Image: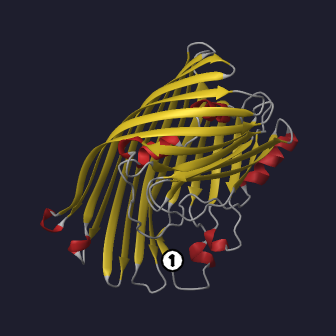
Amino acid sequence: MPHRIALTLLLVFAVAPLEAFDDDFGISEVELKEESFLDINAHGFRKSLDLEWREQLNGWRMGGGSTSTDRAFIRTDLRLYHELSEALMVSLDWDQDEFYAPKPTPAPIAAVHVYPFDQTDIGLAIQGEPDLDKRQSDFGYALIFGRQPHNFVKVTLVEIDKFWNSKNSLDNSFYRRPGELISIEGSYDLNERWQIDFELEQDQPLDFVFTDQISSFQYEAEDYQTRLIFRQTEELIYGLNLRSLRVNKNLTQTQSDQSQQIEYRSFDLYRISQFDPENELTLGARFDDIEDQVADAIDPAASYRFDLNTRQVYATWYHSYSTHQAWDLGLYIGYSDRRKTFAVANSVQFDQSSVQGKLRTSWQYQSADKSAVLVISISLNLDDLADDPGDGGGLYFQKRF
């Protein structure tokens, strides 16, 4: 017991960097087309693979694909967790999720977890993102009830760029109001059939002044995600994924004063039927809605509102035909509304509604125990086969340790 309490005290007084705000100090236009959410769904991780991923503490996966624009969507996860003893664990996490705008590439986050008491599963954690520039060192603590990956709740508080004002000797920039991240995440098996996962994050308002002492940047955000799983039998699974994202930015410079508000909502309901170890059918319905509003106080003509919402139904068939190879076919049918309106005279740049169709075929190469898979996919544009048959492709890899 004494050595566990000593470890706890050591962690409480340690300093470690953690990045929450992604260091994107710009305002980027959302560039998505009518079929973009069909692309993201078609070339993302297969639902059964995603469920396997969430059952593991250790793994690496990366994926991405075309969004029918000049940008791709990217999803990367790295999770390494090692238990030195029942009292002390270390972990490394890397999480990258880009689909609506480019962001600076995040760095891995290291963490130390300690459970100081024998009789309870209540732990503390210090987690950080090492950076040579001390100004960009974030400082965070976490309180954990239970142990990952199941039946736990983790509450985290992070101070963004904690030492920027005290360590900044390179220029005259400073924080008028440093930001904070408050997050709650957890996973619980409600009973033998029901499971819920949740991630709730709030970036508290920050206010940054650039070195010219005139330009400034304000930011706040919230991102709520929930996943509900019902396992009717081992071969029949129902799932529901919900997400709500909101980002507010304001960038004031010498000749511009722009504010941006992005709101994104997603609903994905699906059913996985496994007929045998070699054959699997997934049926689903998904709704995505994103809004991007930019207001320019100096140049009102540059102010606009962009909206895209997509309703789609989809079906995928997975067939493993050998020890190392499998084939996966997906059909996606959706209806999209896409509109961009400028504030001056309420002028409309485009207002489009259309039925979208996509047929995706994938080849999978897998290890003998199926813990590692590589998937390469291409898709056909069913709504315009004559003039534009090709509709991009994607690739993803997943390895569970």
In this view, which residue lies farthest toward the left? 345
Give the percent coordinates (x, y) of residue 26: 44, 70
The crowd level at tag 1 (other Cα within 10 Å; few <14, some 14-19, many 20+) is: some
62 sits left or right of 227 in the view: right
Quadrant of the rendered image containing residue 168: bottom right
The residue located at (45%, 28%) in the rendering is 284
Quadrant of the rendered image containing residue 134: bottom right
385 vs 20: above or below: above
Give the percent coordinates (x, y) of residue 346: 15, 62
Quadrant of the rendered image containing residue 310: top left
The residue located at (44%, 56%) in the rendering is 100
Position of the C terminus by quadrant: top right
Label 1 element class: strand
43 vs 206: above or below: above
The residue carrying mark 1 is 174
112 sits left or right of 344 in the view: right
Give the percent coordinates (x, y) of residue 77: 65, 48
Give the percent coordinates (x, y) of residue 132: 71, 72
Nearer-the-camera pick, 168 or 344:
344
Position of the N terminus by quadrant: top right
Q: What kind of residue is marked 1? A: Phe
The residue located at (21%, 73%) in the rendering is 301
Residue 146 in sight here: no
Residue 188 in sight here: yes
108 sits left or right of 208 in the view: right
Nearer-the-camera pick, 8 or 59:
59
Nearer-the-camera pick, 248 or 355:
355
